[in-house]
Amino acid sequence: MKVFAVNITRTYGTSMKKNPKGQEYDIASMQILVPMENGGGDTKDGGQYTRTGYGFQVTELSVASDCLEQFKDIQFPAHLEVSTDSEMRFGRMQMIVSGLIVPPASADITSVKDYKAAKAA
């Protein structure tokens, strides 16, 4: 999967919210830029909405914590090709980034047109 990655992060520790003895957590994610999608639809309460915009929006991908080190020398933002797997999370199958395939290319992106050209390359 080709992506234009902005950053990758890992947060881990112990939460005391639901369990007084503590619950361990380990969450890794990658923020990527995707072209803005205009559209609309229905809301849960029966209303409707319309979204109009230009440029990019940020989307988050889950990342396997054990592959995080592969990204340590990347100069973000960067065009990357990443491998993905499916993993059961929160009771459903979810795509997760499992590794880095291709070293980064130049991140000289100034427009949606540049983004699409780089992604196609």
Image (tube, helix red, strand yellow):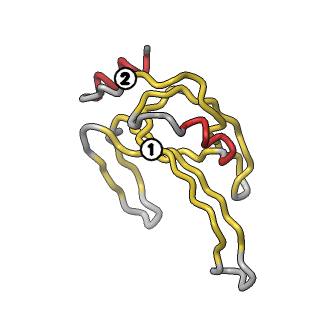
Q: Percent from the top left, x then y, of residue 107?
A: 35, 27
Q: Residue furthest bottom?
A: 20
Q: Quadrant of the C terminus?
A: top left
Please name the residue shown 39% across and 38% down the image. 33
Q: Percent from the top left, x then y, of residue 2?
A: 50, 26
SS at mark 1 in the image: strand
Q: Is residue 46 left or right of residue 27?
A: left
Q: Is residue 94 left or right of residue 112?
A: right
Q: Nearer the viewer, residue 16 or 69?
A: 69
Please name the residue shown 47% across and 31% down the image. 3
Mark 1 or 2, nearer chain start: 1
Which quadrant of the view contains residue 20? bottom right
Q: Which mark is residue 7?
A: 1
Q: Percent from the top left, x then y, of residue 1?
A: 56, 27
SS at mark 2 in the image: loop
Q: Are marks 1 and 2 in contact (CB under 8 Å)?
A: no
Please name the residue shown 66% across and 45% down the image. 64
Please name the residue shown 32% across and 40% down the image. 38
Residue 78 lies, with reference to residue 89, above or below; the image says above
Q: Percent from the top left, x then y, of residue 78?
A: 41, 31
Q: Is residue 80 left or right of residue 89?
A: left
Residue 30 lies, with reference to residue 34, above or below; the image says below
Residue named by callout 2: 106
Q: CA distance from mark 1 to mark 2?
A: 15 Å
Q: Nearer the viewer, residue 86 or 98?
A: 98
